[in-house]
Amino acid sequence: MTAEQSIEPSENKVLTGSIVGNFFALFIPSIVGLLAFSSATLIDGIFIGNYVGAEALAAVNLLIPLLTILFGIGYMLAVGGSVRGGKYIGQGHFDRASSVFSKVLIICLGFGILVVSLGLIFEEGVYQVLGATKELMPLMSEYFLIRFPFMIPEMFIIVMYYFVRIDGFANFSAIGILLSSILNVILDYIFLVQFNWGLSGAAWATGLAQVVPILFFLSYFGFKDRKLRFSWKQKHWFEILHASFNGLSEFINEVSASIVAFILNWLLITSVGTNGVAAITIINYLLLVGLMVVYSISEACQVFVSQNFGAKNEHRIKHFFVVIAIACAITSFIAISLLLGFTEGMVDMFLDDESDDAARLAMEYVNILWPLFLVNGFTICISAYLTALHKARESASIALARSLVFPCVLMFVLYTFIPSISFLWALPIAEGLTFILAITLFLRNPPHKVIYG
């Protein structure tokens, strides 16, 4: 080992520091980073809804399933690889962690180039598969042709975000993403409000805002105290297959969400028309902020648990999960209070005065979907806990049940056999059933059992 690679795991604050202190040290940069990540979608939604219209909002929403699936592959590789890298760091094997990092980055960049090329070649077919009407296709094209090529740098950003955090530079990652979010707001205002560029302006704003995190993460390679080293020359590529399997739950979450979104869009267009799609788009934006808080807690869990798993610190893992459970309970209370107490004001942020029908539907949907936050934080964090312990099958089972099986089956049952009840009730019911499954798997896989068999 080199001098840099011989750093002892005991010097790692994640392995030795205060449990509560570690939680906040990991959670705060994560919430800043994830809110900044998601703000591109959220900010675009506010500007598009107010300055372009409800139809434009619906057009962007129809593209979300495709983008979600493709980014899901990136998240699967990044999360699975970073969890494996975190275990190696906990063991003090920084060379192995660097190898995983290099291979994941190379694969994600190659994948981004491939899918962007195919998407641009088969553009019209993409819109048809996504269920676009002839009226929405021009709007989708205006946004897609500009937005889609930026997937390549975004793949780089996703990988760097997770691995730089696992290397101990969580604050650095968060600052880079936060500056990107601020730039996105500024560009949205300039392109949509001042220049009146419409959907193309929103697409350019989102894409150009990626310049800041790219420069930030490139500067990481100049850090002398980083543990991860990049190299193009790699062997044992099948290791990434195993690492990706451990991140399978992330892929399932993303892909399943795309499928459910596709089905929801189809059912809403069939039953209430474009206004229904615009309304559910607004609800997705409102739910997004609460979910980002939950996912920030789960990311803190993955970093902490994966490294302490490698170091076999079972008691620290147990105590950390108590802190996580308390954080999830507080998040649920705040999210539900905001959704029910300020529904009309939050919906009005996304629509102009001429979109009364979409606003009315959005407020109806909030009254159905708020129970999602009763248990979703606990479910998501249990899935992250199992991923960090390399329990890929169990974590994937939760993700599959929560994001695909239960929602789709219940939507079909309600829409087909009980039309008097809104099919949207399928989502909170599915969340409750998944919570029962998650608790069962959690109790079957305590830290000492996983670590020592």
Image: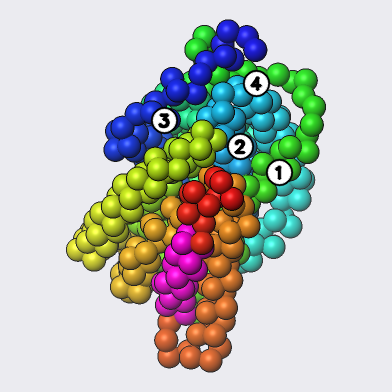
Quarter of the view holding residue 65 = bottom right
* Spot occupied by residue 388 in the image (x, y as percentages of width and height): 53, 44
**Gap between marks 3 and 1, in whole Å?**
25 Å
| Residue corresponding to mark 3 | 14
Quarter of the view holding residue 76 = top right
Q: In the image, which disc is placed on residue 95?
A: 4
Q: Is residue 439 magenta?
A: yes
Label 3 packing within 10 angstroms: few (<14), some (14-19), many (20+): many
Magenta-drawn segment: 423-443
Q: Residue at x 43, y 53 (%)?
A: 381
Q: In the image, which disc is placed on residue 242?
A: 1
Q: In the image, which disc is placed on residue 84?
A: 2
Q: The residue tagged with tag 4: helix, strand or loop?
A: helix
Q: Are marks 1 and 2 in contact (CB under 8 Å)?
A: yes
Q: Is residue 264 left or right of residue 17?
A: right
Label 4 packing within 10 angstroms: few (<14), some (14-19), many (20+): many
* Spot occupied by residue 306 in the image (x, y as percentages of width and height): 51, 39
* Spot occupied by residue 262 in the image (x, y as percentages of width and height): 58, 65
The disc, 4 or 3, on the residue closer to the chain's N-terminal end is 3
443 versus 251 height, above or below: below
Magenta span: chief secondary structure:
helix
Q: Is residue 422 left or right of residue 249?
A: left
**Gap between marks 1 and 4, in whole Å?**
18 Å
Q: Amino acid at mark 4?
A: Asp
